[in-house]
Image (cartoon, rainbow, N blue to C red):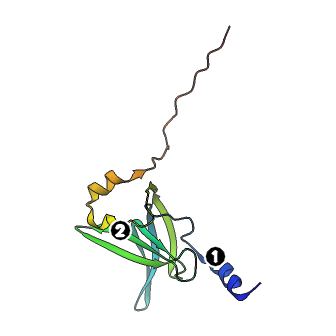
């Protein structure tokens, strides 16, 4: 095994963003050190781009609307200060880079995306079969 593939296999174990796709809303918990204290800060927003695949310099850009201002944060996927990543909502989009959302309002974005609805607590109707007697 050459050195590059050994390095890549070590990185795969540290990737907390595995399986994340553009259009999904995620919550990233990151350790922040302020002086001698350490705390965990959550950043929740929509993934608008994923660059460089799974290599060492790969990044994910997350965007959220805070008040009337859009805030974007770019996370390297192998950043050691990332505690956890959780998926809040999955949306189906037709593009890999969602930079056009920068110009849209929140209401326009909701119309544009198709979100998966959770089937928690909903009962599906039973199918009745006709019996020939």
39 sits left or right of 111 in the view: right
Q: Is residue 43 above or below residue 115?
A: below
Find residue 22 and report its horizontal and vertical position in percent.
45, 64
Find residue 16 and report its horizontal and vertical position in percent.
56, 72
Q: Characterize the local packing of mark 2: few (<14), some (14-19) or many (20 or more) Cα atoms within 10 angstroms.
A: few
Q: Which mark is residue 99?
A: 2
Q: Element type at marker 1? A: helix
Find residue 97 and report its horizontal and vertical position in percent.
42, 67
- In what quadrant of the picture does the N terminus appear? bottom right
Find residue 126 and report its horizontal and vertical position in percent.
56, 27
Residue furthest toward the bottom? 35
Q: Residue at x 52, y 79 (%)?
A: 58
Q: Residue at x 71, y 84 (%)?
A: 6
Of mark 2 and mark 1, the one earlier in the sequence is 1
Dot in front, 2 or 1 = 2
Total labels drawn? 2
Front residue of this view, candidates 34 and 65: 65
In the picture, residue 65 is in which quadrant?
bottom left
110 sits left or right of 25 in the view: left
Q: Which mark is residue 31?
A: none
90 sits left or right of 111 in the view: right
Q: Is residue 81 above or below residue 115?
A: below
Residue furthest toward the front? 95
Q: Is residue 120 above or below residue 52?
A: above
Residue on which disc 1 sits: 12
Q: Element type at marker 2? A: helix
Separation of marks 2 and 1 at Cα, in angstroms: 27 Å
- In what quadrant of the picture does the C terminus appear? top right
Q: Characterize the local packing of mark 1: few (<14), some (14-19) or many (20 or more) Cα atoms within 10 angstroms.
A: some
Residue furthest toward the right? 1
């Amino acid at each position: 095994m050459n050195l590059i593939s050994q390095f890549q296999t070590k990185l795969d174990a540290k990737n907390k963003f595995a399986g994340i796709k553009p259009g999904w809303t995620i919550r990233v918990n990151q350790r922040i050190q302020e002086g001698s204290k350490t705390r965990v800060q959550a950043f929740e927003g929509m993934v608008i781009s994923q660059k460089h695949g799974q290599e060492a310099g790969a990044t994910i850009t997350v965007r959220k609307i805070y008040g009337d201002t859009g805030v974007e944060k770019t996370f390297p996927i192998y950043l050691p200060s990332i505690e956890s990543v959780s998926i809040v909502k999955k949306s189906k989009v037709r593009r890999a880079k969602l930079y056009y959302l920068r110009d849209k309002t929140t209401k326009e974005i909701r119309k544009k995306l198709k979100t998966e609805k959770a089937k928690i607590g909903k009962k599906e109707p039973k199918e009745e079969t006709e019996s020939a007697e």
